[in-house]
Amino acid sequence: MTAAEMTGIGVSPGVAAAPVARLAPPPALPADTGPEPDPEAALAEARAALEAVAADLDARADRAEGPAADVLFAQSMMPRDPALADRIAKALSDGRSTPHAIAAAFGSFRAALEAAGGYLAERAADLDDLRDRAVAALLDLPMPGLPDPGHRFVLVARDLAPADTAALDPAAVAAIVTEEGGPTSHTAILAKSMGLPAVVACPAAAGLADGTEVLVDGGTGLVVPDPEPGRVRRVLDAEARRAAALTASRGPGRTADGHAVQLLVNLGSQADLAAAAAVDSEGVGLFRTEFLFLDRETAPSVDEQVEAYGQAFAAFSGRKVVIRTLDAGADKPLAFVDHGHEPNPALGVRGIRLARTATGASLLDGQLTAIAAAAAQHAADVWVMAPMVATPGEAAAFTAQCRSHGLATAGAMIEVPAAALRASRVLESCDFASLGTNDLGQYALAADRMNGALADLLDPWQPALLDLVSLAAEAGREAEKPVGVCGEAASDPLLACVLVGLGVASLSMAPAAVAGVRAELGSRTLADCAGMAAEALHAADAADARRLVAAYGTA
Ligand code: PEP
Ligand code: MG
């Protein structure tokens, strides 16, 4: 008998079938039951655990190439360092249990590295990882961290940190399934940008064991354990045909009856640049500039920013690039800005509000200076927008500041419900607006976008969110100023048609989503899109909206 099918939320389309490999959490240290009755035997067990870790790293290094292989070989030398075994022996003779003796030995090395500072201090986290692996080997638990079973696999995890997702090798990972996680979490955004099929908020995946063959549909959110081979073949063939049709789809976004909708890409890091520029799009609808500011001790200089923005403008020469000024605070704190203590950082001094502080004002001024200088050196059509605008006054101040830097096209992100409700006033001062449906959904439904337990509320199909989109799009039409969408909602082909029916002028999404959205849009008239939008607005809830729109025109 085959195991029951499971459903979660499909957040990155595509279909894949492969065996499961789980991301094991770091082992919890059991209570210290020392001293060990036979310290000699305990030391031998600890050495065997260290050797198992080293051998695992060697095997990974053999399968890796280039710098990754060198790093893994170098890492495998650490558990074999005789000084480590000496310290474990000492901790055992001090009366520690074996797991605690291992942790203590790694802890003393860690302290030495931290004291050395600089590059060595940054390697302290590597030791934590090795300690966790050694304790796991000792206790016969799965190795923590990203698995490397030596073949393509479906990565299953309780949740994935963005750092884990960013470190994935798309050639080895066929798909991602997480038990928790929301549809607009940054992990979902990263999976989409890597083109990996992904399903989040699938609690039943907790029961999937390593090695179980699964079929994953990142569009519908379906996860099928032990699928019948015939079904896998049919689904993968259909996927191959879909992929071929998408590759064949080219040109600017249009409905079947020729209504133009700009299709743009979201850009979140320098590493994405070449791949994003190669996609057939009309430009960048959201350039997240945070990547230049996060994870560093001091702010990047204006020159450094001119260089980084210039690279993006050069890659998109002749196309539109909507660059968003720094969206810091809340989940993206900056080391060089004192954010103070905020009980609710998501409701605190974040986004454009940072400019209320002296440091934030000077960061914004430096950033606009750099954007203007880079724009002057390149042929991209540069638009600038501010994150987290709440009032028409904030929009007007930002527009004036952009103009004073010679930046001709200034806009506001609409991701706070107040700005959507008063979109016509917000648009009075600016040239365009862009709906950030990820935050707009979080604030409209009062649901933290990182909280997978609230995934149903964060669903971008929520009719209340679509009401706000509709208000803003209508304001744009009346003012004859473009209002687009750059949140994750734009990358769902059916929802993209709904957004067009609501009146949005452009859709910006992960590069991998463009072809699917273009193909769906090209198969619907503008009247179809309006009909789909009406169905979604009248739906009882998100699931109902999805169902009604999927069924549109099939009766
Ligand atoms: C959004 O909130 O929808 C958005 C596009 O911005 P970010 O996801 O970077 O907060
Ligand atoms: Mg946002």
Image: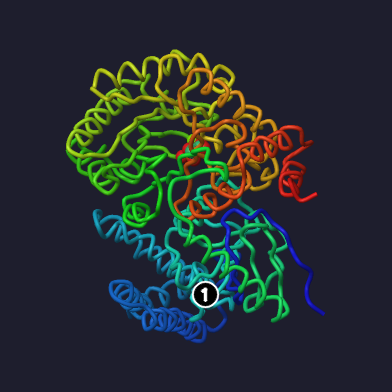
Residue at 55% x, 30% y: name it: 344
Which quarter of the figure has residue 234?
Answer: bottom right
Left or right: residue 438 compared with residue 303: right
Rendering colour mode: rainbow
User: Residue 359: where, in percent of width, then height?
Assistant: 30, 25
User: Residue 245: where, in percent of width, then height?
Assistant: 53, 63
Q: Does any portion of residue 331 appear in the rendered image?
A: no
Pick the front one: 159 or 55: 159
Residue at 58% x, 43% y: name it: 496
Answer above or below: position of 551 versus 344. Answer: below
User: Residue 257: where, in percent of width, then height?
Assistant: 57, 42
Mark 1 residue crowding within 10 angstroms, few (<14) / some (14–19) / many (20+): many
Answer above or below: position of 551 versus 527. Answer: below
Pick the front one: 164 or 104: 164
Q: Secondary structure at mark 1?
A: helix
Answer above or below: position of 551 versus 498. Answer: below
| Furthest residue toward front | 257
Residue at 42% x, 18% y: name it: 395
Pick the front one: 42 or 186: 186
Residue at disc 1, CB closer than 8 Å to ligand 1: no
User: Residue 422: where, in percent of width, then height?
Assistant: 55, 16
Left or right: residue 549 compared with residue 167: right
What's the residue type where badge 1 is placed? Answer: Thr
Q: Does any portion of residue 55 appear in the rendered image?
A: yes
Q: Which residue is mark 1?
A: 98
Pick the front one: 321 or 331: 321
User: Which quadrant would the N terminus be assigned to in this image?
Assistant: bottom right
